[in-house]
Amino acid sequence: MAERFDAIVIGASPAGLTAAFNLARDGRKVVLLEKPLEIEGVKLLSLPVARATLADLPHHESLMRAMTRVRRVSTHNKLWAATEIGTPSADKADLVSVEMDDFIALLGKHAEAAGVHRRGGFKGLLVEEGGRVRGVKAADGEDIYATVTIIADGEESESANALAPRLDPLLEQEIILAHETWDVGHEHLNTQMSTLAAQGELTLISGELLGGLPTARAWMFPGRETLSLGVLLPREASEAAHFGVDDALNRILTHPAFSRFFKGGKRERRVAQVRRRGGLGDLRRLFGDGWLLAGEAAGIRDPRHPYELRMELTSGHCAAQAAGSALDIKDGSAITLGLYKRMLMDSYIWPELKFAQEELARHENNPDLDGYYPELTVRRLALDLEAGTEARTEKREEFSGQVRSERPLWELLKAGVQGARVWG
């Protein structure tokens, strides 16, 4: 016998769980169809965004335990400044790192408490001849119908590919992304980073350590007992230079400035994949009759900061609001669900993706942008105190073109690192 819901959410991703949680909390009948996703390791969470999308959930005790390092930027009343590591309470912090398995489990728990029905996988979408999505066929063969279906099961979503296909990307539109998680132990982290348990730092690396490739990035930040290490390389330049992610990771792991952090540690997991570069031009069609795309399934991610969760949460929240408005008037047509795209355009996401795309183009045209600074500096611009909020976007023009160097990070300077930046 067929079942009927107000909304179907496909994918237990941050975007999918955020959408399901918000809809159920507003009294909607929601079913979440799970599809296994490899979401592990440590990522950065913007608490202003979490509060805006998950209400009081960021204050929950379990999330406090999942938060591994609280960090805050001190600007010294200047646009560019070195990072002062402090020990603010979680209420005053901006960015925290979270263990993804803990975070996803917590979101799932609260979605269930709000009334979300959780089920296993599905066989496919139920699509009418005119393209309207009526629901899904569950893994057990049962049909499930809903006014709105939200697809949020990752970049390689078969459902998203079926509804909003994209042309195969050109080589220059692809990146190679690798991410490692190292188990190094709590005491080792505190000793080597000279920091207390409630403190931490995010290190961004570019320049010659990454082969001098334009737009190449690497990052490192701590979890409770782990270090997260990631590398992003432009595929075309990487293959032309015969310099891959293994080369980049080995350079970082063996460099005297960073090797001591990993000494005695054990590599727990590693993920390497070729992905689309991202940015405003990489978005799929976001909505249609009876359906919405959210999170990475829609192509919504910041190509500069793939370790951040903010865009996932915001897109899931906007999808829930658009779906809720459609349910209020019992109309799941594309005209009604188009509110979703308007909400995204009015949020920080649209200008951020546009700015990211323009910034990548500037770095491609001038590969030396990352390496010419004589000293290591900390750039406040991209991870603002209000990361992921409109205040961050409004300051873009004010910050644009301004460069100011503050005190050097002596430890890394002595090691001879070029192109590394530490963000509080």
Image (spheres, rainbow, N blue to C red):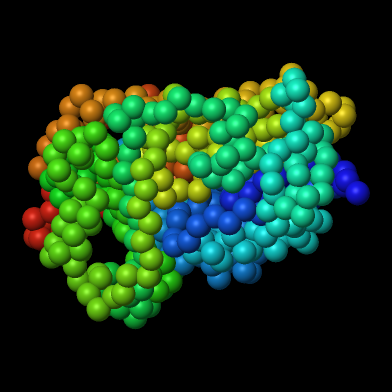
Quadrant in which the C terminus is drawn? bottom left
Q: Is residue 99 visible?
A: yes
Could you say where residue 280 lies in the image, as x and y percent from the top left?
46, 26
The residue positioned 9% from the left and 60% from the top of the image is 414
Front in this rendered view, residue 244 or 130: 130
The residue positioned 37% from the left and 77% from the top of the image is 186
Furthest residue toward front: 141
Dividing the picture into quarters, in which one does residue 87 lie? bottom left
The residue positioned 18% from the left and 59% from the top of the image is 250
In the image, 402: left or right of 222? left
Residue 188 in the image: above or below residue 279: below
In the image, 364: left or right of 161? left
Could you say where residue 278 lies in the image, as x and y percent from the top left?
42, 33
The residue positioned 50% from the left and 53% from the top of the image is 45
In the image, 3: left or right of 193? right
Q: Is residue 96 visible?
A: no
Residue 101 in the image: above or below residue 360: below
Could you say where residue 383 lies in the image, as x and y percent from the top left?
39, 44
